[in-house]
Every structure is written in C-alpha cells, then in structure tokens.
Image (cartoon, rainbow, N blue to C red):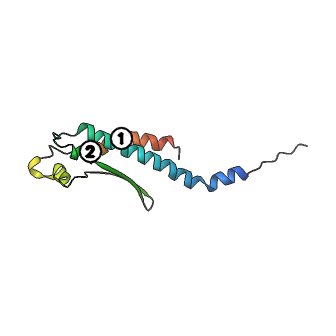
C-alpha cells in the first residue's frame, strides 16, 4: 500500500489572500486604463491649445466605490465643462467620452487575462 500526503497550507494561504491579489490586479488594470485614456485625450483633442492648460490639466482618478472600481477622466481647467457640454459648440470640442470609449475593449481584455 502507498500513501499520498498533501500539504494544503500553501493552497489555503493562497485562497485566503485571493481577494487581496485580485484587488491589486484590478488596481493595476485601472491605473493602466486611466493613463491610456489620459494619453488618448491629450493626443487627440479637437481644440487648438493656445496655453496648453486644457491639455496638460486633463486628470484621471482610479478609486473603489464599495465593490465597484471607478475610473474617471476629467478636465482640470474650469472651462473644461464647456468644451464637453456647451450646446453652441455642438460637440465639436468633446474628447473625454471618446477617450473613455477608446479603452473599453482593451480594458475588457485585461480583465479576461486575470482569469477570474
């Protein structure tokens, strides 16, 4: 007769730390996505940048809202809201939604790569 003994301590320890490891992985994906959104917006904005403030002050933030990972991109200048929403511009200067949407597919691929 032969015996087989399995030391499950490493497996148990890994399972205990899985939530933390998943959250760290999601944070890295969030940071990468936010940076790519920012780069896209700064590179592809449709306005003529006279002072460079509108471009240079585009900001992103990655944070947890309960169980949801929130990745946001915003203007850092007070007139940024008008670039995005002013009716008389008819969308001519919008870039933030386009920057967000430009990363959706890659974001999904990175999530799938985590094999959750």
Q: Nearer the viewer, residue 57 or 103?
A: 57
The residue located at (8%, 50%) in the rendering is 88
**Residue farthest to the top, as pictured:** 43
Q: What numbered label is drawn on residue 36?
A: 1
- Give percent across and percent down for residue 73: 31, 50
Q: Earlier in the sequence, mark 1 or mark 2?
A: 1
**Quadrant assignment, res 37:** top left
Circles 1, 2 touching at the beta carbon (< 8 Å): no
The residue located at (31%, 50%) in the rendering is 59
Q: Is 2 displayed left or right of 76 in the figure?
A: right
Q: Is 103 displayed left or right of 90 in the figure?
A: right
- Give percent across and percent down for residue 82: 16, 52
Q: Which residue is mark 2?
A: 56
* Secondary structure beneath label 1: helix
Within 10 Å of the Cα at label 1, are there few (<14), some (14-19), or many (20+) other Cα atoms? some
The answer to whether residue 70 is visible is no
* Secondary structure beneath label 2: helix
**Quadrant assignment, res 45:** top left
Q: CA distance from mark 1 to mark 2?
A: 14 Å
The answer to whether residue 21 is visible is yes
**Residue farthest to the right, as pictured:** 1
Residue 50, compared with residue 60, is above or below; it is above
Q: Nearer the viewer, residue 4 or 102?
A: 102
**Residue farthest to the left, as pictured:** 88
Q: Is 61 displayed left or right of 54 in the figure?
A: right
Within 10 Å of the Cα at label 2, are there few (<14), some (14-19), or many (20+) other Cα atoms? some
Q: What numbered label is drawn on residue 109?
A: none
Q: Quadrant of the N terminus?
A: top right
- Give percent across and percent down for residue 19: 56, 55
Q: Nearer the viewer, residue 59 or 53?
A: 53
Q: Nearer the viewer, residue 47 or 84?
A: 47
The residue located at (88%, 43%) in the rendering is 2
């Amino acid at each position: 007769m032969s015996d087989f003994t399995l030391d499950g301590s490493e497996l148990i320890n890994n399972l205990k730390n899985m939530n933390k490891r998943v959250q760290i992985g999601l944070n890295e994906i969030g940071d990468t996505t936010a940076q790519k959104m920012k780069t896209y917006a700064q590179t592809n904005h449709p306005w003529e940048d006279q002072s460079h403030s509108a471009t240079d002050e585009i900001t992103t933030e990655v944070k947890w809202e309960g169980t949801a990972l929130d990745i946001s991109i915003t203007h850092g200048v007070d007139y940024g809201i008008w670039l995005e929403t002013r009716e008389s511009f008819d969308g001519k200067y919008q870039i933030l939604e386009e920057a967000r949407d430009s990363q959706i597919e890659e974001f999904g691929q990175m999530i799938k790569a985590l094999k959750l």
